[in-house]
Image: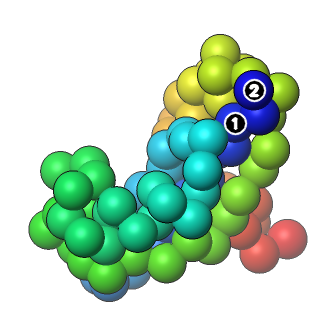
Amino acid sequence: MTCYCYIVECADGTYYTGWTTDPERRVKTHNAGRGATYTRMRRTVKLVYLEEQPDRTAAMKRERAIKTLSREKKMKLIRP
């Protein structure tokens, strides 16, 4: 099953990274306040980066790797 690693930009300008099988549904979930606790307090969010992964394991590994990046490196990933 194809999975995706994603970054959303929150209303306060911060970034949240996660993974999903359905990016559109996941962004709607975040904006409805039913996503991660982090995004609940920082709505609304918009999808700024999406990276396809072959499976759940790869998506979770990539999510962890992106979360360790500095804000500057995340910005370079989003806007090359």
The picture places residue 46, in percent across and down from the top left corner, at 49, 78
Crowdedness near tag 2: few (<14), some (14–19) or many (≥20) residues, C-alpha within 10 Å: few
Q: Position of residue 9 (x, y in %)?
A: 46, 73
The residue sitting at 69% across, 36% down in the picture is 3
Real-space Cα distance between discs 1 and 2? 6 Å
Per the rendering, the mark at residue 1 is: 2
The correct choice, above or below, for 50 with respect to 47 in the image is above
At a point 33% along the width and 63% down the height, the residue shown is 30
Amino acid type at mark 1 = Cys
In this rendering, which labeled residue sits more in front, label 1 or label 2? 2
Quarter of the image where one finds residue 32 = bottom left
Q: Which mark is residue 3?
A: 1
The image position of residue 4, as x and y in percent, is: 68, 43
> Looking at the picture, which amino acid does disc 2 mark?
Met
Please report contact status of discs 1 and 2: CB closer than 8 Å, yes or no. yes
Image quadrant holding the C terminus, namely: bottom right
Give above or below for 28 relative to 17.
below
Q: Is residue 52 above or below residue 34?
A: above
* Observer-nearest of 5 and 74: 5
In the picture provided, is 59 more to the left or to the right than 1? left
Q: Quadrant location of residue 1? A: top right
Give residue 8's position: percent from left, percent from top.
Answer: 50, 66
Could you tell whether 1 is left or right of 74 in the image? right
Looking at the rendered structure, which numbered label has been put on residue 59? none
Q: Residue at x 26, y 62 (%)?
A: 39
Q: Secondary structure at mark 1?
A: strand
